[in-house]
């Protein structure tokens, strides 16, 4: 039996991107929530909940981007000029956010610390917003002619992409609030419950709006979701989104600590599955498939050997770090310095 290496690599890169979204999503969400939490001690606790893991979370972004460059060079060469502005802004925001993360603990003056707190929050918001814009621009399609990007500098800037940008900010805010519920206690945890309820409602509404809009963006999307018998196979996805939305609200009402975070992850997973149903096998919609964009099989095999060796190490180290820093983070406890 021959293995379709292109399909294997598509699944690997899709998995890396999803892991980045949910793992870096909650620590970006913590930064997005900063304006709602004003007390210095609470902000220190918030940052200390993500301090041991935030660098490692961004490893998956490198794997996704590097894998795209190495295995799907046509997609990389097409998407980079199409999304050059939002991608550049995203990377600058991540750098700016990382500097602020370090500097806020090394600044004594109150005004300077407030400035770095603001920079941390703005960097988190801009990075999340730009990621959502890139997603919206990809979904609505990229103009490709003669195996090259044929659109303009501002094709990515549309009402739909701006909405998906705000939707992802809300989703990351939900993950951040649910993470704080899990990792904190006392008044900060109670605030996180309230924030999770608000961001959860906005996230579910945003998922519904994007889902209703997508069939009107492309005939292929309509065929996947609104024609029989295909719709019978994909119908469980929106039904499960509704079920998870209800379960999230119930978990928040019951003051569960872990279940809200799991529900948030579930909403992202179902949204990602829905996106995959709409796009597959396109990697640059509406015309470039994963097989069109793939490099030579010999290159895929060579790269897969290194990935098979290194990926379990990264997964093992990541799991160990999360296990090592399990438990609650409290004010006054030793933290990030």
Image (cartoon, rainbow, N blue to C red):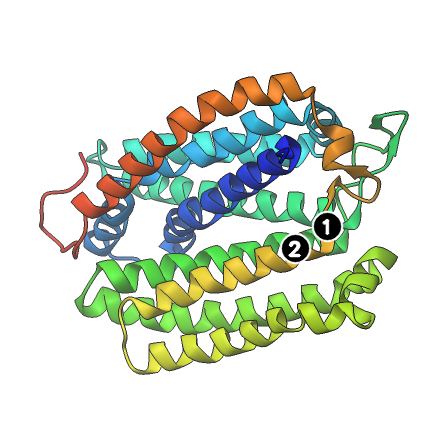
Determine whether, in the image, residue 239 is placed left or right of residue 252.
right
Q: Badge 2, how many Cα within 10 Å: few under 14, some, many 20+?
A: some
Residue that carries the numbered disc 1 in the rendered image: 279
Count of number-bearing discs: 2
Q: Is residue 141 above or below residue 193?
A: above
Q: Quadrant of residue 221?
A: bottom right
Instruction: Confirm or deny contact between disc 1 and disc 2 (CB under 8 A).
Output: yes
Q: Residue at x 62, y 17 (%)?
A: 299
Question: SS at mark 2?
Answer: helix
Please identify the quarter of the rendering in which residue 113 is found. top left
Q: Position of residue 291 (x, y in %)?
A: 74, 33
Q: Quadrant of residue 196?
A: bottom left
In the rendered image of this protein, does residue 94 appear above or below residue 255? above
Q: Secondary structure at mark 1?
A: helix
- Is 87 drawn above or below residue 70 in the view shown? below
Looking at the image, is 34 positioned above or below residue 337? below
Q: Around disc 1, counting alpha carbons within 10 Å, would you say few (fewer than 14), some (14 to 19), or many (20 or more)?
A: some
Give the percent coordinates (x, y) of residue 189.
25, 67
* Cα–Cα gap, marks 1 and 2: 6 Å
Residue drawn at (21%, 52%) of the image: 45
- The answer to which of 230 and 257 lies nearer the viewer is 230
Q: Quadrant of the N terminus?
A: top right
Q: Residue at x 68, y 68 (%)?
A: 234
Judge whether residue 170 can be spotted in this image.
no
Which is nearer the eye, 207 or 231?
A: 231
Q: Residue furthest right?
A: 146
Image x and y of residue 268, in percent: 51, 59
Q: Which residue is mark 2?
A: 275
Question: Residue visible at 63% across and 17% down?
Answer: 298
Q: Can residue 166 be seen here?
A: yes
Q: Position of residue 296 (x, y in %)?
A: 69, 19
| Quadrant occupied by the C terminus | top left
């Amino acid at each position: 039996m021959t293995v379709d290496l292109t399909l294997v690599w598509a699944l690997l890169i899709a998995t890396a991107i999803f892991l980045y979204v949910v793992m870096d999503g909650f620590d970006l969400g913590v930064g997005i929530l900063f304006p709602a939490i004003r007390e210095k001690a609470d902000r220190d606790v918030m940052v200390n909940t993500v301090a041991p893991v935030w660098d490692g979370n961004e490893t998956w972004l490198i794997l996704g981007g590097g894998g795209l460059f190495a295995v799907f060079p046509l997609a990389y060469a097409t998407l980079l000029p199409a999304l050059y502005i939002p991608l550049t802004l995203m990377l600058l925001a991540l750098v700016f956010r990382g500097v602020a993360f370090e500097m806020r603990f090394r600044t004594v003056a109150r005004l300077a610390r407030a400035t770095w707190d603001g920079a941390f929050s703005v960097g988190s918001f801009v990075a999340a917003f730009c990621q959502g814009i890139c997603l919206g621009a990809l979904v609505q399609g990229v103009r490709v002619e003669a195996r090259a990007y044929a659109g303009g500098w501002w094709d990515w800037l549309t009402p739909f992409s701006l909405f998906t940008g705000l939707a992802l900010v809300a989703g990351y805010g939900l993950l951040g609030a649910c993470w704080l519920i899990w990792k904190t206690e006392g008044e900060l945890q109670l605030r996180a419950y309230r924030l999770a309820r608000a961001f959860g409602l906005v996230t579910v509404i945003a998922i519904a709006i994007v889902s209703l809009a997508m069939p009107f963006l492309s005939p292929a999307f309509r065929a996947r979701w609104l024609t029989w018998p295909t719709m019978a196979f994909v119908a469980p996805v929106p039904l499960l989104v509704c079920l998870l939305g209800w379960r999230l609200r119930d978990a928040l009402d019951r003051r569960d600590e872990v279940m809200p975070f799991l529900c948030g992850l579930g909403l992202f997973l179902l949204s990602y599955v829905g996106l995959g149903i709409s796009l597959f096998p396109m990697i640059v919609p509406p015309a470039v498939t994963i097989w069109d964009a793939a490099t030579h099989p010999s290159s895929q095999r060579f790269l897969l050997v290194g990935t098979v060796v290194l990926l379990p190490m990264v997964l093992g180290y990541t799991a160990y770090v999360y296990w090592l820093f399990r438990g609650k983070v409290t004010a006054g406890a030793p933290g990030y310095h």
